[in-house]
Structures are given as structure tokens and as C-alpha cells.
Amino acid sequence: MSETLEKLRAEIETINYAVLELLSRRAGLVTRIHDLKSAAGMPAFVPEREQRMLEELVRRNRGPFPDQTIRHLFKEIFQASVALQDAEAGRVLKTSRARQSGDLRIQIGDAVIGGAPVVVAGPCSVESEEQIESAAAFVASLGLRFLRGGAFKPRSSPYSFQGLGPLGLELLGRAARRHGLCAVTEVVDPRHVDLVCQHAHVLQVGARNMYNYELLREVGRTRTPVLLKRGLSATVDELLWSAEYVVLEGNEQVILCERGIRTYETQTRNTLDVSAVALLRQRTFLPVVVDVSHAAGRRDILAPLGRAALAAGAQGLMVEVHPCPAVARSDAEQQLDYAEFERFLEEVGLRRPAHGADQPWSAPEIEAPLRQASAG
Amino acid sequence: MSETLEKLRAEIETINYAVLELLSRRAGLVTRIHDLKSAAGMPAFVPEREQRMLEELVRRNRGPFPDQTIRHLFKEIFQASVALQDAEAGRVLKTSRARQSGDLRIQIGDAVIGGAPVVVAGPCSVESEEQIESAAAFVASLGLRFLRGGAFKPRSSPYSFQGLGPLGLELLGRAARRHGLCAVTEVVDPRHVDLVCQHAHVLQVGARNMYNYELLREVGRTRTPVLLKRGLSATVDELLWSAEYVVLEGNEQVILCERGIRTYETQTRNTLDVSAVALLRQRTFLPVVVDVSHAAGRRDILAPLGRAALAAGAQGLMVEVHPCPAVARSDAEQQLDYAEFERFLEEVGLRRPAHGADQPWSAPEIEAPLRQASAG
Amino acid sequence: MSETLEKLRAEIETINYAVLELLSRRAGLVTRIHDLKSAAGMPAFVPEREQRMLEELVRRNRGPFPDQTIRHLFKEIFQASVALQDAEAGRVLKTSRARQSGDLRIQIGDAVIGGAPVVVAGPCSVESEEQIESAAAFVASLGLRFLRGGAFKPRSSPYSFQGLGPLGLELLGRAARRHGLCAVTEVVDPRHVDLVCQHAHVLQVGARNMYNYELLREVGRTRTPVLLKRGLSATVDELLWSAEYVVLEGNEQVILCERGIRTYETQTRNTLDVSAVALLRQRTFLPVVVDVSHAAGRRDILAPLGRAALAAGAQGLMVEVHPCPAVARSDAEQQLDYAEFERFLEEVGLRRPAHGADQPWSAPEIEAPLRQASAG
Amino acid sequence: MSETLEKLRAEIETINYAVLELLSRRAGLVTRIHDLKSAAGMPAFVPEREQRMLEELVRRNRGPFPDQTIRHLFKEIFQASVALQDAEAGRVLKTSRARQSGDLRIQIGDAVIGGAPVVVAGPCSVESEEQIESAAAFVASLGLRFLRGGAFKPRSSPYSFQGLGPLGLELLGRAARRHGLCAVTEVVDPRHVDLVCQHAHVLQVGARNMYNYELLREVGRTRTPVLLKRGLSATVDELLWSAEYVVLEGNEQVILCERGIRTYETQTRNTLDVSAVALLRQRTFLPVVVDVSHAAGRRDILAPLGRAALAAGAQGLMVEVHPCPAVARSDAEQQLDYAEFERFLEEVGLRRPAHGADQPWSAPEIEAPLRQASAG
């Protein structure tokens, strides 16, 4: 019997090589068609043709494979051919590591995101001049370079505090400049992009707007770096595609931000997904940071989450710190007070030596946003 | 012993009544303060004061309750007082059944949503004049009144077909008018609202934009009915709050749409949540419809899902139907062909008698959008 | 150019047919090997061989497909061959509709599950003789045939009420017999199966034990019908595989029970998944019922959920009813009182005409469990 | 006006203190009743009485609070009293940090879990003597002390490889002893506990059995350490309660294992939940380890996940390593080969210096299981 077995196996191998040969020739033909068509400006993919080919193949199928297997196998073959064209036509995402193996470093003034870990800190919302000035002074005193603070706050309920709007932007921008910090703030409307660019060094697109492609396109038309947060239940693929919307408009300076995903667990506001951090670091050269405050939704585990995020490869942490969390107008239960924040920095190993604060940093100028004409 | 027990229990009951009396008096005082303050234009709620009161209470606590219990119980008491003011100040959602027990009926031309079940049918995307004309004729021939079709398609990947844009809108509007149908189509950008209003009878806000509050406000400034889809992993509360954003701008004609939520199950594209339908029907007077196509993401279980949606209280179904699903440029695997769609209608019990199609329906005019000036 | 295009396309089609021909021949060879091997008692699938073939194919790949595409396509081809053998060897699940198109009807005494909708009602836990006697009398008075009641209660916390154990079993069995009802109760330990069989007409395997394969095997060795609940976050496939564990031991009388899945939504205890009902009804001939009480975890939406379940194809509903829910020792917030339960029956359309209760039903005898020797 | 405001506020504060006084007295009375009752062996909590009190309070309510607010506030007050009794009666979980602030260190032979990070490594399943012998030699050569390997494999499909059973146990135990390692293996049936204890140093209860309370009780009756995995979608609370089932039977040596939870993301087999690690480390003194292989379900991100787990506070990692993953009979896609595993150890910072392997370790003797009589 083993002789028969050997003979049958040899036949199978011969068939394998013949199929390989045919598939390679087929791919060559598809590439030639593709080139002819793109030269003539014709659409590359015609699903009707594919459909007809599948039907004809099924019609000719004499078994032993059932028709659905034949349909499945040839769909895979057709799809591989399309993917081949896409890859050649540049459909590998523009932010893929396959295109650039080194990490992208985004320079903002003399600060950099994408290298050694940075900390983006500040209150959830800008609430008053005193509050944001206090926070900015505190953040700067620790040698940090990025000040967050929301002026336009997307809130689930229309009855919740919605932020100070343009006034908040101004207060934030002023406090940041005064202390030589980069201002990071959210933009929620394509019509506000110009305005926000005048006050912020980094445009944040929040979790609720990760699928807001018109907003993504609009921030993509600026030259201001964009911090793009992962949606509440977005996949890693969807986050990368959303970044692609920005990059395709010409703005390559995108920072990805994992901030926890929505799961059944109620102990935390969201579930921090460190696997996403690891996967993103592997698949793209864009910087990846983690917002531990929104992931946890509580103060007491921020330090271990921060350490885990860095250990998984995050190049920065985002943390909410407020002069008096108890009276904060949003996210009261997750913001740290100053003492807690200093302890946090120490526990995650990002407390700079004291003399760090002495260096005479220059406040980064807001670059005039180089925008293409937009519909706004 | 049972005597002692009885005595202790009687003491407890006396305390209960004393606490009740104090809480009621306290609520009366809070209401008076609230009235004084709102007359003087002062902010109602001062968290610092609450914080100080809690601290003082904890300071005075001599046990046996631990401090955190005292803090918790008084927070509940404080919150009940705030809620009382909110309720009196009208913070019960504007769309709550507590305000209006009867169902809202939205009249569009001579069609109504919010009464007997309606069917909103049509292709996922408008792809060509022939395609949408064919779909419109088919939909109308069955006596249905609502034609769906996407012109602006929000797609996860920027490389997927993004819809025909303004041309798609025009083709859809024209096909709908020609066949006396109401056009339902998605708007994805606050700057497009005017344009879409010129072609559509119902503005759809898709799942990806349920948290896009600027868009919600903008459609809230029109007088065109809005079909608001539940976000991919939105809670029922969040959906109701998003509707409130629309209503607060003056547009009360909001139709809520359950379309499945994101779960771990991969057999279906999303998990249809009929409990949400039941809860929404109980909590709001707004019409509730169900998009079975996006919930299932496959053709073969649309009929049982449609029946379940109606049984749970849905006042309409949304279904994708395409002249030739195999060549559809989006959602190919979930769109029904004409024969399948007719079978679907029969299986969900919404196939109208043939003579229904004979009635001379008038194409509903698009009402000139009565919009307040918007930032766009 | 169009001539060239036509020529290239014709070449592609020729290759398609050649590949089809080779794949069919290959499948024939694999089948012959498989037959030879199974005749000789040799293992069918040798992953090392597959691995070696893949490596050789990649070694021979000259492009244009990248190596990973070649690996992927051939894995699909190899897998299709394995699937072909499996299908022929009977690996289509024993409970698949592909094997039996008609619904399985499980006869218990003169009651049937798998035909017209049944209602399984009773308290969450058996708490006392009075309680279960009252519930049994009530359930029987409505013409229903199935009495549920837990004796062994799996509870998340070891400090929660764990059920009356063997005493609860006896009380339940006696009350059921007295009123001519079939007793449905949970078994949680393979060592209890014999005991439970002596008192119950249907063995329930709860959601927490759906992956407890030793328990599944043990109930599979009895001849008592098994009601198998879907796990808290089990997929439809996993539920069907768990049923297969029971059936493979010889007990084909399995009733599948959807009871909601765990999601992020907190308005309901679980999220009722009617798509699963539709899919199960399509894929298996086993009866499918729905436990609306555990899905909802609240009383006020049981009727719409019940209707939706039936509309999706469920062949029965499971509902918790208790003489006095406020004092129930478990699930107090979701059990119905008698008046609520009667209203529920009416609202789901399963209220029998009053005279139904007059028919002299015989209490179904517990069949002596025909068990194979077990390790217990 | 500000005078009036001050007066009203002062009245509110007086009421606050009066309520505080009453609540404290009430708690004292409840405690006395509780003591009387427990001395007399009476049940502490009588829900009917609570129900009657609530009804009477609502009857007496004259506003302005709506009845449901009164019901809610008093339920909170009643519950606080019950909690107080529970806390005093020892219902703080036995494994709570509130009881013991230091970490539990579980000593097995001369190895310890609960101190410096350990690595539990080995194949998913024991497949043959050669395989497990090779793995044991390799694991020992790296200076590691724990060898994992499944003999009873719970698999979703009954047609998947189910492990070698008792033979697998013996092979594992022998290989471990030969190389001075501690054997960690799964037990899936309460009737197997004795048998597994004879071969294993640590009994693993898998994710699928976390809710299998009979199994938990049975392993709780042994004196063998238990590695308890978190269920597929279990909450942190549920995991702690499951551990309590073990501890309440007398076995305090429980190791908790986070292994990822089921979410919508499909890039990873499960979603590693580092927040759970942080929370568990805060709430319990039990050791916490992380199974990175099952969390990821893929090889390429194991190192960042391992680092993140340790950074979040995990006291050990569990990893699958196989002499030839490509031919593994289970989990082929996630097991590391030897070279990959050595790299992994280095990347997570747990590669011991080479001389570590020279220390003459003694094979830990399996302690004769000191079991109480069990139902088995």
C-alpha cells in the first residue's frame, strides 16, 4: 500500500506545481490587462466579469468539490490578483511600515513625538483662565512639553458642559504660549479647523469622530499635526484607515491614540487594549500614544496602565490633570490632582530630573496653517 | 427575645419616618435656593459647596458606618435633589413618553412614519441613473413609499467607493419624484445639509455619525425629518441623547433606527438588539425603525429579523434591495435582488395587495428647508 | 487595444478552466489517499506533509505573487480537500439540517417541544414546598406543561443563595407530578446527573456550563432530554458544538436555548440575540427556545422580547414566574408575579383558552434513566 | 438675597447633620438586631420586612421627592446597613487585600509564585513522550521552573484533538520530575481531581470552567495550588468570587490568570485586559499571572504583551512553546518554537543568566493530596 500512497502523493505534488505555474501566468496576464486599462483610464475591476467567470466555472464543475468550494477557491484566486494590482498601484497604506521601516518623528517647535516617550497632560476641559494658567504652569514646571485642554467638548448629553468654545481655545493657546508648551485640543467640526489651527499645535480628533471622514479630510488639508483617537469600538484596521483619510489629503503628521475600547467590563470606563498598541507599532510608522485617563475612567490604576502602555511600545501617554478634580466640570472621577500627577510620573518612570525645567525653551510658534481651499 | 426585636424594629421605623421628614424638608429648601438663584441668573449647582458639605459630614461621622458609606449615602441624597431641580426645569428629555404618551407620527407628503409599519427600501449606494431608476420603479410598484440610496457613503477605507456625491443626490431625488417616493439619504457633513435638503425628504445620520454633534445640531436646524441611526456600540441612552441634540435645535421630527451593535459574534455583521427597540418604544414617543440589512450583513436571515423587529415594536424596516446585488459597489453580500425582496415582504407580512399600487399618489414636494442661519 | 484585451481575457479564461481541471483531479487523488489510509487505520491528516509541500511551493515561486499569497492560496486548496474528506466522513454535525430537513420533535409524556410554541415557566429557584406548589398549581391552571425551578443554583458569589439541592429537586419533582407538569431543572455536576434524572423530565445545562464538556458528555449518556443554554459570550458555532458533545454520547434530545449574550449595554442584563435564533433554526433541526427573563433581566420588556423571539422562529419561551417576586431569593428584579405572567402570556399570544385546563392530562412518568456506566 | 441664601443653606446643613445622626443610630439598631438574630440562628435578612417598610415610607411621602426617589434613597440606606453586617460578619472576600496587605507567596518545592516574575512554559497539549520530554529539557535548560502541558483538553468542537488524557498526565509528570520542574496542567472534571493531583504540582482550571463551581469546590478540597483562569467574558468581580469558591473549601493557594477577554476585535484571539491585572493586584493578595499566548492567539506580539503584563503588575507569564509549532495538534498558530521562545524571554527581560541553569534544583515532590472526603 505504501507504494500506492507514494505514487498518489507524487501525482498530487505534480499537480501542485502545475497549479502554481498557471496561477503565476494568470497573475502576469491580469497585470498586463491592468496596465492597458489604467493607461486608457478605464476602471480596473469589473465585478460583472468576475461574476460571469465564476458562473462559467461552476457550470463546468464536475466534482468532487461542491460548487460552493469552487466558487470560494476561485474568489480567493481572483482576489489575490486584485490585491496584487492594488499593492503595485500603491494601495499598501501610505502609513505602512512596509513603506518606511523607521519611526516617524513629528517635530513641534523643539518637542518631538515619535521618539522618547512624551506626556500630554492637562485638564479635560478648559474651564477658566485661572484653571488653565495653573495647569500650564504646573505642566511646564515638570519639564513636560504638551498641554491638553478641551474647548469644544463632545458630550453624550446635550445638557452636559460643552466647553467654552472659542474662548476656551484662546485661553488654552495663551496659557500654552506663556509657558512654552504645545497646545493639544479637539476639533469637532470641519468648519472650525481654521480657527483651531490658530490656537493649537496639535489637532485632536476624538474617539467619537474617528469615523467622521469629512472632518478627517479637513484636518488632512492643514499642516498641523493630528492626534487621532481610536473610536469607542473601532478595530485596528479602521483606525489605520481613518489615519489614511488624513494622510491622503497631504498631512502625514498623524499621531494614533489608543484610549480603551468598549466591552462588558464595568470596573473601568473602557478596556485598555495594549495589543492594539503592539499591532499598531508593528504595522505603521506613525507615532502611537495612549490616553490612560479615558481608558481607566478612574484614578487608582493609571500608573500600572501607563507602565503597561509604554511597555507595549507606546511613544507617549495622555493624562488628565486638574488643579481641583473634585470640582471639574467633566470627567471629575478620572482627573488627577497635582500631587497625584507627580506620583504618576514617577511611577511610570517619566519624572524628569528637576534641572530639566531650567532649560530656556522657546514657545513653539503656531505655524500658519497651510491649507488648501476647503468647502468651509 | 422577640419582644426586644419588636422594640428595636419599632425604633428603626421611627427613625425611617424622621429621615423621610428631613429629606422632604431638605428638598423643599433646595428648591427654594434653586428658584432664587435662577431668578438671579446664578449657576444652580456648585460642586465645591457639595464637596465641602461631604467633608464636614465625614468629619462628624462617629460610625458605625464607614466614611465611604456616609459619603455614598449623602451623594445619593444630593443627587436626588439635583435631579428634582432638573426634572422641574424640564430636563426630562424632550422626546420622553413622560411628556407625550401618544406616538409621534411624522407626515411626509401623504406617507406617515410612526403609525403602521413602513418599509424603506433601495440600494446601498446610488450607482447610476439606470440603477436608481430601476430600483425606484420597483419599490413604487410594490406600493411602498420610501426609497433609500446613498450619495455620500462613509466607508471605513478611503479606497472603497465613496458614493457619487452631488450627482448621486440628484439621481436619487429625480428617481424618487418620478415615482412618487420619499427619498431617504445620508448626510455626512454639516456643510452639506442645505444641499441634501434640496433632494431628500428624510436626512439620514448614519451609525458612524451618531456622536457627530455638530452634524446633529445642523440637521436640527432644518425642518426635514431626520433618520438617526444608533452608533456601532452606542447605548440606548446615548441614542436618545443624540436625538435630543437634534430636537433642541427645533426639529422634532426624528426617527430612531436600530441597526445592530458590535459584538464578538462573527456570524452576523452586527447583533440586532431587539431589546433596544422595546426600550426605545417605552421611553420615547419618536418613531423607531430597524435596518435589518446592516444588522444581519447577510441575506438569508433578513425575514426572521424583520419579523422580530416588528414584533418588538418597530414601526418600520429598512432593507437594501438592488437590481443586481452581485455587482453592487458596496454591501454586495447583504442586498436583496427583486425576487428576494418580494419574498421578504411576504415573509414579514408587509406585502401590500396589488391594487395598492394603483392609487394615484402625489410625489411629495421637498419643502424648502426652513433653516436658521448656520455657520456653514 | 480592445482586441488585445479580449485576447488576454481569453487566455485567463483558459487558465481558469485548466486550474479547475487540476483542482478536481487533485481532489480525486486526495480522496483515494484518504480511503486507503482509513482502511489501514492511519491518521488522515499529516500537517508535516502539508508544511513541506507549502515550503516547496514557496521555494519554486517565481512571482509575480508574493510568497505569502502563494502560501495562502495553497492553504485554501489544501483545506478544501480536508473539508471534502470531513464532509464525506460525516463531519457535518449530527444535528445539521443537512442531515434532516424536518424539525426534531421531542416528546415528553404527552407534551412536545419542537412544534407549536411551548412555555417553560416557574420560579428561578425552588425555595420552599409552598412556593413551588403554588407555582406548579398556577402554571398548570393556565394549561402550560413545563415547570422550571432551580435546585442547584450556580451563583457568581459563593455567598449568594445556592439552592436547596437534593431537597429542592424532590420538592420540584413532587409539585410537577401533582399537577401533571414536566419538571425542568439544572444539573451542574456530572456526579449529580443520576440524581437529577430521578426527579426531572428535562435536564438543564446552564449558560455557565455550556463549555463544561464532561457534564455535557454525562447528560449525553442519559435518555432524558437536555435543555442546553448558550454560554454568556458563546458563538452560535460553539453552541452547536456543545450540543454535538451531548448527541455524540447517544442522546439526541437536545433543546437549544438562547438567553442573551454579554455586551456593553447595561440597560438589559444581557442582549437578546434573535439573529442566533434565526441562524440556529436554519442550521439545525433541534428545537430552539428563548429564555426571555435572563436576556432582559427586567420585567418591563418581557412581552416584546417574547414576541420577537417567536417571530424569529423560537419554538418556546422560558420565563421566570414567582408567587411573590419581591421576596425571591434570586433574580428578584426579573421574575413576574402571577398577574404579570398572565398578561405576558396574552401579550405574546400564548394564552390558551380557559377550557384547555380541563383536559385530564396525565403526569408524565420519569423514565428510568438508561445510562451507560459512568465514572461517577 | 444673599442673606436669604445663607439662611437656607444653614438650614440644609443642620438637616444634613440630623440625617447623619439618625442614620448612625439606625445602623446601631440594625447591628443589635443582627446580633440577636445570629445568636438565635435566625436568618439575618428578611426581604418581606424591607418591602413593607418601603411601602409604608412611600405611603407617607408628601413630596416634593417623587415616590421612586424615596424608594431609591431608602433602598440605598437599607443596603448600607446590610453591607455593614456583611462586612462585620466577614463578607469581605477572604482573599481581599483588606485582610492581608502583603502578597501571598505560593511555595512549590523551591519555586515560588507571587514574588519575582515566573514563566510557565510548555506546549499547549502533551502529544507524545518525545515532545514533552524535549519541551521539559528545553524549559529546564533556560532555568525556568514551571512546565505546562494539557492532558485533558477542553475543545470547542468534539472533533478536535481532546488530549491524551491519563497517559498525557503521566508523560507530563514524568518529564517534569526528570528535569526538576513543576507540572501545571488542566483539570476539567471534579472526578479527575485526585488523579491529576498525583501528577501535577499546580491544578489549572481553564477559562471555560471558571464558572464550574463544583469543580472549583473540588480543587478547593485539595492542598495543591490552583491556577484559575478568567472566563472568556468574566468580570473581575466574577473571577474573585470564583477564587473564593476555592478558598472557602480550605485551599488558599490560588493563582489568578488573566488570559484576554472576548471582544469585537478580530486581530487578536482575545483582548488582553491589563486593567484587570492592575485591579486584581490592588484588590487581592493572590498572585496574578498572564497567559499571553491565549490573549494574543498569534506569535508576533507576544513580547510587547508580556512586557505590558509585567508592567501592569503581573507576577508571572504563561507562554506556549512547542518543539515544532507547525505540526502542533492544537493552537498551532500561537505556539513559539524554541528560538522564538528564547528571544521572547530576552525581550520581556526574563532571560536568566546562563549559569542559573547550573544550580542543582531538586524536583519538587508531589505532595500527597490532603483531601477531605468528597462526593466523588
Image (cartoon, coloured by chain):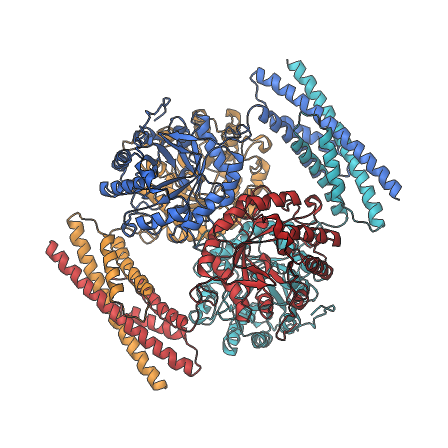
Chain colours: A orange, B blue, C red, D cyan
Left or right of A65, for residue C322: right
Left or right of A105, for residue C305: right
Q: How many marks?
A: 0
Residue D370 percent coordinates (x, y): 72, 69
- Any part of residue A155 in sight: no
Q: Quadrant of residue B54?
A: top right
* Nearest to the observer: residue C26 or residue B359: B359
Query: Is B92 above or below relative to C170?
Result: above
Left or right of A30, for residue A354: right
Quarter of the C terminus of chain C within the rendering: bottom right
Residue at 71% across, 21% down: D10
Query: Is B329 above or below relative to D225?
Result: above
Residue D368 percent coordinates (x, y): 70, 73
Residue C334 percent coordinates (x, y): 62, 46
Residue A347 percent coordinates (x, y): 56, 46
Query: Is B338 above or below relative to D52?
Result: below
- Any part of residue A97 in sight: yes
Residue at 88% across, 40% down: B4
